[in-house]
Image: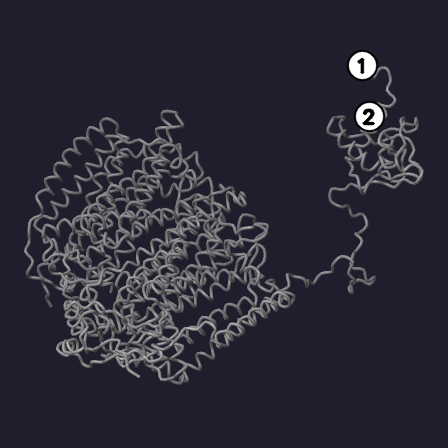
Amino acid sequence: MSTIDYSVEERLVHGDRSLKQIDDAIVNPLDAKPNIKYILALGLTVTMLMIGAASLGWTFYKGIGVWGNNNPVGWAFDIVNFVFWIGIGHAGTLISAILFLFRQRWRNGIARFAEAMTIFAVMTALIFPIIHTGRPWVAAVYLLPYPNQHSVWVNFISPLLWDVFAVSTYFTVSFIFWYIGLIPDFATMRDRTTSKIKKVIFSVLSLGWRFSNRHWQHYEMLYLILAGLSTPLVLSVHTVVSFDFAVSVIPGWHTTIFPPYFVAGAIFSGFAMVQNALIVIRKIFEIEDLIPLKTLETMNKIILVTGTMVGYAYGMEFFIAWYSGNQLETFTFINRAFGPYAWAYWIMVSCNVLSPQFFWFKKLRTSIPFMFVIAVFVNVGMWFERFVIIVTSLSRDYLPSSWAYYRPTMFDFGLLIGSFGLFFTLVLLFAKNLPAISIAEIKSVSEGAQPSHHGESNHSANGTHGDGHNG
Amino acid sequence: MSSKMNNYVRKNLPAGLSKWGFILLGVGLVMAVIAYNNNPLRASFASLIGFMFLLSIGLGSLFLVALEYLAGATWSVPFIRIAEILSTLVIIAPILAIPVLLNMHDMYEWTNKAVVDASHALTQKKAYLDINFFYIRFVSIISLLGLFYYIFTKNSLKQDITGDQKLTTFNVKLSALFMPVFAIGLSLLAIDFMMSLEPKWFSTIYGVYYFAGSFWVAIALITLFAVNFNEKGLLGTGINKDHYYSLGALMFAFTAFWTYIAFSQFMLIWYANLPEETFWFIPRMTGGWGVISIGLIVTHFVVPFFMLIQRPSKTNPSRLKLVATMVLAFHIYDLYWLIYPTYSRIQSVKQNDASLISSPFFGWIEISYIILALGILLTVFSFVGKGKNLIPIGDPKLKRAMDFHL
Amino acid sequence: MDKKLYSVAATFGNADDIILATGKIASAGYTNYDVNTPYPIHGMDDAMRLKPSKIGYFTITFGLTGTALILWLMYWVTTTDYPQVIGGKPFFALPAFIPITFEATVLLAAVGSALSLFIYFFKFPNNSHPLHDTEYMKSCSSDKYGIYVEAKDPLFDEVRIKALMHECGAENVYDVNYEEDFLTAKFEIFDKKFIGALIVLAIIVSASTYLHLNKLLYMTPFNWMMDQPKVSAQQKSTFFADGFGMRTPVEGTVARGNMPYAYKGQPDEAGKYLTNPLQNNDKNLALGKAKFLTFCSPCHGNTGMGDSRLNGQFPNGPTLHSDKVTNWPDGNLYHVITEGQNVMPGYFRQVTKDERWAIVLYLRTLQRALNAKEGDLK
């Protein structure tokens, strides 16, 4: 076993490419004809998308009675999927904003891709609460506080409305963040392309970016500000989602640890999804050296940490359910673990808490097939976590006479498959048409990219001059 | 493989540190003894504040040490020795728990068999809230954390001399092991010593709440020491404004994080409005305690948040020192808010006056234990820090860390 | 056509050189110059002596505006425009408003600062800048580090600048000229293409609005549940043999809250067994009076004398002060109101049970008032 040398920083970009070659490596695959691996992957995801579209069409035509939702389980696959996909989105913002604030430079290679995944995941997630209303073409309007002749307003006290605000803000801010990051790359592509149409498209999209340092200065400041705004925002989004449950008085839903616990779970599953997608994408587009194994390993460590945090929350919930002396709480948790949905509970625990523990071992943490499988488990587990929370609590609440066992129908499964189809179709289309790796950011961390001396200013702590170096 | 930093000249700690430490310790000790003789119950509550305060500094510092190893962070290396010294408090703080342990019967309702038998909720948790089990938990958690503290610091000091990188590798592995122990240990200590003051009340987020405050105050104290020492030239070649920025940003982030956790806890209980939970907040929202609660929002959130929000203020040493000092006070304020309503309740039962439940008690007894805690803090620092290098000169990451730029 | 010089530009091969060159240009006192690098270079802001960006002030202004606006909106809606008690919370339930307030603050701060970056700081979109489409720009957007000094700089001296650039190790030095169309282009609002595009846009928008509001919203499943798999009132049913959509209730069915009348066709029985359950008080008398004036007076007259305005046009309602009626027990009167007699129809559909008894009560009062005995004066 080789020992690690802590005194030198680890290389972030491998392959010793010149700046020009970085352009080539990232942009050329976008211009090239798609390879067979790509076509196959897209074919698969589009098929899944079509399954979802058919299920959704039938749902619209017949009404949501075709789903398995029924008294007392009024929230089921639809809300499970919503929470799951919103959670997936969180990893993107974490990578692009929080790790940016912490100056984790390994994030540069994957930030763009993760941000795109955020946007697609939030789009996928948004479908579910809207179709859950049954009449989405009407509901979409009634969810917003707009002045109308009935003088009827949305209910600002309802956590469901907080969701509307949180998710739409999250989507907007993530989109702005992503787009602002893309502008310099659009400009690079504008200047490279020989196609007239692409030139027009990229000119419009790049807004006339000139790589001017007078712009870079404000640009970097804004990037920092947006990262600063996104960080509490991303926490708030899953917090608000957790409020949907936690402000109620349903046993198993009303517990104070829900906000941080949901956020940790979201990051956990989001990282697993990003890791999965990255493994596929770097294989399809053959950019293994731009997304080195080290990056994946670091992500696995984060999966391990957040998985353990989720485990802490499971334990704490169980402990306090007992400690509270509240019979309903105690019953709910016993019922989760040993009731009719025990199978779901134990899938959740084994996938979320046990499976990431393999990442303690460096050998397993750096084996691509192994980590891929574990990340799939994590996503399965996190999907089941939401299922367990939502369905078990509803299926057996206060009134034993109305207890019932929830069974999903084929349309529920169709929509679930369709959501994966939509998400991965968007991911694949993005990776083929836009630079999935930030060209400018990769350049800025490549070997010799930065001046050997940090300018002429002196960086003593008491110096008042200069506020640059935003990284 | 040695990458020791050789140009570091060890200097003595500022003389004021131990002088003030002794003065505060002496004054605090005398006052505390008088206070204890005067009113043992109240003094024990005051001592509980002091205990939880020192414990949070110790736990937060120890967490930072482990976090640095685990995350492979470089920026925090120059002041990790300060954190190591401060984490000694994990094993020193229990001194202040002695008055609490002596007066448990009056402070903690669940030690009273008649009360427990009369309440279904308390009978349910008899197995956990048991005096023997309480002692077992307390001793084992403190000694386990103390063990981690011992190994971390021993390796770090050894590395000063040998510069052996294997010690870092060992500590990295150790810190992975440390994290779950820390999470469970901190939560249980918070539940045992503070949440069980109101034994019928429960909140799953309580451990996280105490953690948020602990890390916040630890960062503040480390900032305070690091900035002061750096200005006196005690930190080798000196740390730069990007280090300051990182410390300020972390303090800022945890201001927001604490607010987030505190708000979540309050909002969920307020919204669901279940009597078995709201009874904890109702006395805190009425009368004198209501004012204290508003003050908690102002001090724990508004003031530090807006004092640190601007970029330049995170690199301004005098601003950082000011905020860090305030953070110390505000954390004590928070602990007071958590602990003292129980004392008000006990008084209102004793004196048979329902209005007392919402009236805060604060006087020289509380102040004497705060002085004592600060005295212990400074004395421990000057005693433990004496003769040590204030930066980990053997740490392989140190050179990179001193050159750290955002 | 003469070319007009925009700037003199030079590209460098590495980051150290560009920092050096920038430092020299800056210390030479030029002000209208800029650096173009494919990614931000550390230390460049110091080398160019730029002041820190002020965009943070925009963020905080927009953010606080968002906070104020949303709090005001929620305050106004929940306390003034449409106050409602929800979940036992106060109208202005501040803790419940914190999440939305936070989101609105972040939304406005982010959108506002992004827009101010483009519009105020960058003056974007700007695809007609002279630098675009030059060799210089193309190398700067890929792997070279460029610097240029504009011709409008007061100290501009082509030869000196070029010499300076070469001295610093420039790889290439360029003259960047304004493009011809850039200088001659005129801005015309009534451009044919522009007007054409507007017309096309108008047609698309109005057509889609029309289709949406008049067609789409009347198609299944978008039509507000107009098509429902159930039989409406008066609708033909293919399911039942008799073809009626509406079904008569099963025999013996009793509607909620309605006890069937027990003395159908038995006035004497009713008189014997029924007693007025209502108390003789102001409230019941007032009710009885109202109902009497509404339902009884058209035939029996306002005081029950049988002298109504319909007299002569319709079978006369008899007086209610006859001995027969006066001596009837209450139950009989109730029976007649319920079932009717002779040409009088039953009023059980219009007048509820309690109202009928109230009428009886009122009628008794009328009778007593019109045939007062001595003893009543006491």
Q: Residue B249 at what x, y percent from top left?
A: 26, 54
- Residue type at mark 2: give it: Thr
Q: Judging from the image, what secondary structure is the residue with disc 1 in?
A: loop
Disc with the residue nearer the chain's start (1 vs 2)? 2
On screen, residue A468 above or below B325: below
Can residue A280 be spotted in the picture? no
The percent position of residue A451, horizontal first and vertical second, equals 17, 71
Q: Please name whichever residue, C95 or A82, is drawn nearer the observer in this view of the structure.
A: C95
Q: Residue at x 23, y 56 (%)?
A: B246
Q: Is residue C85 above or below residue A182?
A: above
Q: Nearer the viewer, residue C295 or C243?
A: C295
Mark yes or no: residue C356 visible.
yes
- The answer for how far apart the CA atoms under marks 1 and 2 are is 16 Å
**From what the image shows, is residue A323 above or below residue A314?**
above
Tell me the number on the disc at residue C378. 1
Tag 1 and tag 2, C-beta contact below 8 Å: no
Q: Which residue is mark 2?
A: C365
Identify the secondary structure beneath mark 2: helix
Amino acid beneath label 1:
Lys
